[in-house]
Image: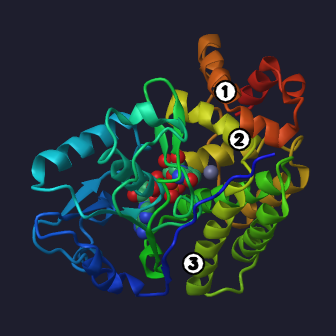
Amino acid sequence: MSYKNFPMVPRVVFGRGSFNQLSEILDPKRLSINAPFIFLVDDVFKADGNLTSRIPLAYDDKIIYVSAKEEPKTDQVDSIVKDIILSTKERPSGIIGIGGGTLLDLAKAVSIMLTNEGEAKDYQGWDLVKNPAIYHVGIPTISGTGAEVSRTTVLTGPEKKLGINSDFTPFDQVVLDSELLQGVDKNQWFYTGMDCYIHCIESLNGTYLNAFSQSYGDIALSLCKEVFLKNNLSQIEADEKLMMASWHGGMSIAYSQVGVAHAMSYGLSYLLGTKHGIGNCIVFNHLEEFYPEGVKLFKQMKELHGIALPQGICANLTDADFDTMIDISLDLKPLWENALGKNWQKIITRSKLKALYKKM
Ligand code: NAD
Ligand code: ZN
C-alpha cells in the first residue's frame, strides 16, 4: 500500500477585511517590474468599485474580468494563457483568482498552463503536469466548493469534464475574507453551500473513509448543520462558518473521494451545462437509496430556506443523450468505488442510472 503524499495550501489569511492586506502579501512575490500580477476576477464585480478599487495594481499588473455564467473550459484556459503571454513583457509574477469555484479553478489552470507546454486538455487527469505552476492566490467570494484547498481544477474539455489533479494545482496562498461573500444570491448561496454538504455526506459514507478524512468531514458537516438548520446565527457568523465548512469539506474529500451525486452531476454538466452546485442538488434530491439520512436532512434544509429545484431537466432527452451522460458518469470510477465499494459495477448498471436521470 502506498499512501498519497498530499500537498496543502501553505499560507492562509482568515478575517473580515483581510482583502486589504493583499498588497503586503503580493509585494514580496513580485519578480520584477516587467513581471505583472494578473487578477482574474468574476465579472459580477466589474461594477463593484468597493472591491475593484482595493485590488492593488502596480506597474503592468492587470485585471481580466471573466464571466462565471459557464463553468471553465480547457479552450478558455488556453485563450487566457495566450492573451497573457502576448500582452506581458515577462512571465507574470502571479495569478490571483477572485470569485467562486469557477474563477478559482481558472486561476489554478492558467497558472499551470503558463509553465507547461501544450493545451489544458492534455493535462486533464491525474499527475500529468510536469512543471511547477507560477505563484497563484485564491480569494473565494462564495463558499462551498472547497476549490480553495483542493488539488484539482475542474475543466470541461472537448472529450471530458475532468480535473487537472496535480501537486502543482493547490494555491500558494488563500485569503479568506467573509466580507467578500456579501451580495451572493440566496439560491446560489444554497447551491454552492450544498456542494460542501454533499462533499461531507459522500466522504463520510464512502468506502475510502479514513480518520484523516473523517476528522475534516465531521467538522464540515457540523458547521453545515449550524449554518443551514439553525437560524440563531448572525449573517457574519453564518458566512464565516460556511467559509470554514467549505475548507474542511475540501480537505475531507482530498484524502477520500466524492460519490454518487458528483458522478451523476458531471453527466448533467457535460450534456446540459448544468452548473456544479445546482446539478449536485438536483441529483442528490433523488439519492435516498444511497444516502438515506443525508437526503432527509437535505430536504429539510431545502424546505427551511424555501428553495425550489428545477424539475424535468431530463424530460426531453433522447436515448443518445442519456447514453452520453451515463458514459461520462460511469467513467468516474474512483467516485463509484468510493460510494459503493469494489463491486460497484454490479450495483450501478446503465439502466439503473437511466432510471435515476429520468426522475430529474
Ligand atoms: P461560481 O464560481 O460558478 O459562481 C456562481 C455564481 O455566483 C456566479 O454567477 C458568480 O458570478 C456569482 N458570485 C460569486 N461570488 C459572488 C458574490 N460575492 N456576489 C455576487 N455573486 C457572486 O460558483 P461555485 O459554486 O463556487 O463554483 C462552481 C465551480 O467550481 C464549478 O465550475 C465546479 O466544477 C468547480 N468546483 C471545483 C472544485 C475543485 O476542487 N476545484 C470543487 C467543486 C466545484
Ligand atoms: Zn463538489
Q: Position of residue 357 (x, y in %)?
A: 71, 28
Of the two numbered discs 3 and 2 on the same chain, state the one appearing first in sequence: 3
248 vs 322: above or below: below
Residue position marked by numbered label 3 in the rendering: 239
Residue 87: image x %, image y %? Answer: 11, 50
Q: Residue beneath label 2, please?
A: 283
**Which residue is labeled 1 in the image?**
331
The image shows residue 302, relative to residue 120, as above or below, that is below
Q: Is residue 99 left or right of residue 87?
A: right
Q: Quadrant of residue 94?
A: bottom left
Residue beneath the point at 47% across and 73% down: 181
Could you tell me the amino acid type at mark 1?
Answer: Asp
Across and down, in percent, residue 158 comes to 43, 25
Q: Secondary structure at mark 3?
A: helix
Q: Is residue 319 left or right of residue 12?
A: right
The amino acid beneath tag 3 is Asp
Mark 1 touches mark 2? (CB < 8 Å): no
Query: For numbered disc 1, what is the local secondary structure?
Result: loop
Residue 306 in sight:
no
Q: Nearer the viewer, residue 7 or 139?
A: 7
* 224 and 14: which is toward the camera: 14
Mark 3 neighbour class, 10 Å CA radius: few under 14, some 14 to 19, many 20 or more: many
N-term-proximal mark, 3 vs 1: 3
Q: CA distance from mark 3 to mark 1?
A: 35 Å
Circles 3 and 1, Cβ within 8 Å, touching? The answer is no
Amino acid beneath label 2: Val
For label 2, the crowd category at 10 Å Cα-Cα, with few meaning under 14, some 14 to 19 and many 20 or more, is many
**Which callout, 1 or 2, points at the residue further toward the start of the chain?**
2
The alpha-carbon separation of the residues under discs 1 and 2 comes to 17 Å
Quadrant housing the C terminus = top right
In percent of the image, x 46 and y 72: which residue is there?
174
